[in-house]
Amino acid sequence: MQTETVMNEKNWVEIGKIDDIPRLGARVVRTEEGDIAVFRTADDEIFAVRDKCPHKGGPLSQGIVHGKKVACPLHNWNIHLDSGEAVAPDEGCAATYPVRVTGTTIYLSTIPDTGCPNQ
Ligand code: FES
């Protein structure tokens, strides 16, 4: 299998195939700015969120995915995978990252979406 890195203005990086991530699971992509959790929902949607809970930094990649949310494994905050926002009444948000799926290949941009601090 040939691995190719695709770069353009969004720094798209090929990170693998959809089937590399189990349904309702995640895999972690390590970057210089920190780990990014790439999730696959039951409907085969792919979302990328900083692997750091906005509460106390728990590893969201180890949480339980339900619908388009993940439950943090530490104190069970729920985080929307599409916005990175915590579900009320909790407050906070984790940075999200653009994801593109071409065929079955996943491309991730390492430049976070705006709207959420990448901390
Ligand atoms: S660190 Fe995620 S809920 Fe507390």
Image (cartoon, rainbow, N blue to C red):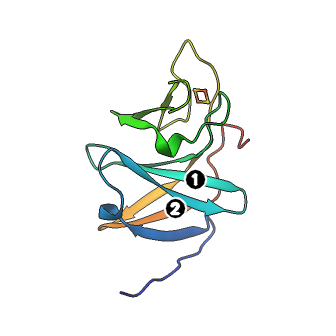
Location of residue 2 (image quadrant):
bottom left
At 52% from the left edge and 35% from the top edge, which residue is drawn?
83
* Image quarter (top left, top right, bottom left or bottom right) of the N terminus: bottom left
Find residue 70 and report its horizontal and vertical position in percent: 44, 34
Q: CA distance from mark 1 to mark 2?
A: 10 Å
Q: Is residue 21 left or right of residue 112?
A: left
Most distant residue in the left direction: 43
Most distant residue in the top direction: 89
104 w.r.t. 95: above or below:
below
Tag 1 near tag 2, CB within 8 Å: yes
- How dense is the environment of label 1, judged by Cα within 10 Å: few (below 14), some, or many (20 and up)? many
Q: Is residue 79 left or right of residue 118?
A: left
Find residue 88 and report its horizontal and vertical position in percent: 53, 15
Location of residue 20 (image quadrant):
bottom left
* Image quarter (top left, top right, bottom left or bottom right) of the C terminus: top right
The quarter of the image that holds ligand 1 is: top right
Name the residue tied to disc 2: 108
At 66% from the left edge and 62% from the top edge, which residue is drawn?
31
- How dense is the environment of label 2, judged by Cα within 10 Å: few (below 14), some, or many (20 and up)? many
Find residue 68 and report its horizontal and vertical position in percent: 38, 35
Q: Which mark is residue 36?
A: 1
- SS class, disc 1: strand
Q: Which mark is residue 91?
A: none
